[in-house]
Amino acid sequence: MKAVILAAGEGKRLRPITSSRPKPMIPISGKPLLEHTILSLKSAGIKEILLIVGYKEENIKNCFEDGTKYNLSINYITQGKYEGTAHATRHAKDFVKNDSFLLLYGDILVEGSVFTEIIRVFKQKDCEGVISLIRVNNPHEYGIISLNEKQYVVKVTEKPSPEKELGNLANAGIYMFSSQIFQAIDKTQKSIRNEYEFTDSMRILITELKGKIVGYEIKDKFWSDIGLPWQLLDANHYKLDNLKAENHGIVEDNVVLNGVVYIGKNTIIKSGTYIHGPVFIGENCRIGPNAYIRPYSSIGNSCHVGMSEIKNSIIFSNSAIPHFNYIGDSIICEHVNLGAGTKTSNLRFDNKSVKMKIKDIEIDSKRRKLGCIIGPYSQTGINASIMCGKIIYENSIIGAQTLINKDVPPNTLAYQDQNGNVVFKPNNFTINE
């Protein structure tokens, strides 16, 4: 059984998290997002995987290599031009040959049993394809699928206006097809967006080639397309709920481990530390003394957390949170260093949901608590404060005593002047070496 994973995109809505890595390589509970998917595919009986890569592809190739360590065969094809999802899928034609195959986007995290169910439906139904569906509250932001009474797809509508009332079954980005889909792709023309749209290929398969596509609704199972930063926290929450407690490190006396805690090799948990799981801590970390790690926190490899508090956050590898820091509901990327007394805010005084600016558009997270994002190779001075929902982009420096109440662009030095105003200047320090 074969699977094709589309993993070439840049993940621009997740910047600065994706400034240094492809979106599928964002760590979730100690593993890259893509690794969680690959392991689930293996459990579903997949033996051969093709990764369609592009943006920072070496990051993916160096991690997974040829798949031997997973007892799988993993191949790669580079998508040189980004001309749509049908264009990306066409690259898999020689890999698939005449077989049926699973097709999915590399930025999706889903409960592994969904793959098994889609394979089962494909084998049982009279069809050339299966498309996974998820019910959404905002159908105008998705591709909406219309089904007939036998659950076959009759129409695919991209981001329909609300007055069309086409329902709320959205394309969940996981498919299974026979090789006939490539005939439809070959007939697909560029859309008004100047891209080869996979939704057009499905329409051609149904209308011109008389193929049948079954809709499979994902119910009562975790699914996320992780299109927005705070959805990483949701994904981390889901994976930590399935974490198994293991200790491969050193735990000193007078340490409390409460609940499920995973501790990686060569990590030392120093005296006075309290860890309330579920919590994941990677390898070669130094935690404490007197650290407080609260539930749903993931800490990558080679991190230092001193006398500080971390709650419901993701800390990437090689970052330091050493002295009297508070990190809540936040994402701290790799090679970040926080000065003593740096604090993140995660709650508005009016208790309204926190908003975050994504690609210059302010989006309501609908979360009462949401902290900040600090991009890779950034650092803060002593007693810096970062307001909720703010983003510090990559390779930036926050001066001592500075209150960050608006986003900090990449490669920026932000500091508070004598009049209390925050000044942005180009960062002339070379941090990322």
Image (spheres, rainbow, N blue to C red):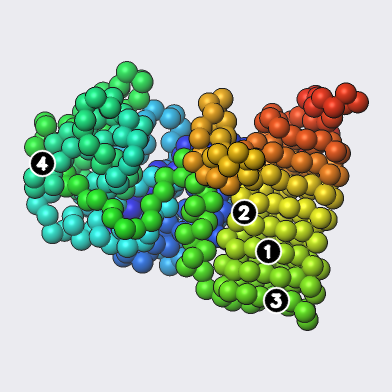
Q: Residue 313 carries which label?
A: 2
- Cα–Cα span, label 2 and label 4: 43 Å
Whole-angstrom CA distance, mark 3 to mark 2, is 20 Å
Identify the mark nearer the N-term, 2 or 1: 1
Q: Do the residues labelled 3 and 4 touch (CB within 8 Å)?
A: no
> Taking 85 as reference, is 241 left or right?
right
Q: Is mark 2 on a helix, strand or loop?
A: loop
- Which of labels 3 and 4 is toward the front? 3
Tell me the residue that label 1 is attached to: 293
Of residues 89 and 75, which is closer to you in this image? 89
Q: Is residue 181 above or below residue 243?
A: above
Q: In the visual, does 4 lie left or right of 294?
A: left
Residue 5 pos. (x, y %):
39, 48
Q: Is residue 273 visible?
A: yes
Q: Sequence order check: which comes first, mark 3 or mark 1? A: 3
Instruction: Decide which of tag 2 and tag 4 comes sooner along the chain.
Output: 4
Q: Distance between the residues labelled 3 and 4?
A: 56 Å
Q: Residues within 10 Å of mark 3 (few under 14, many from 20)?
A: some
The reply to whether the C-beta atoms of the residues labelled 2 and 4 are less than 8 Å apart is: no
Looking at the figure, which quarter contains the C terminus? top right
Query: Where does the image place residue 30, in percent across and percent down from the top left?
Result: 58, 61
Q: Which residue lies furthest to the bottom in this view?
A: 253
Q: Distance between the residues labelled 2 and 1?
A: 10 Å
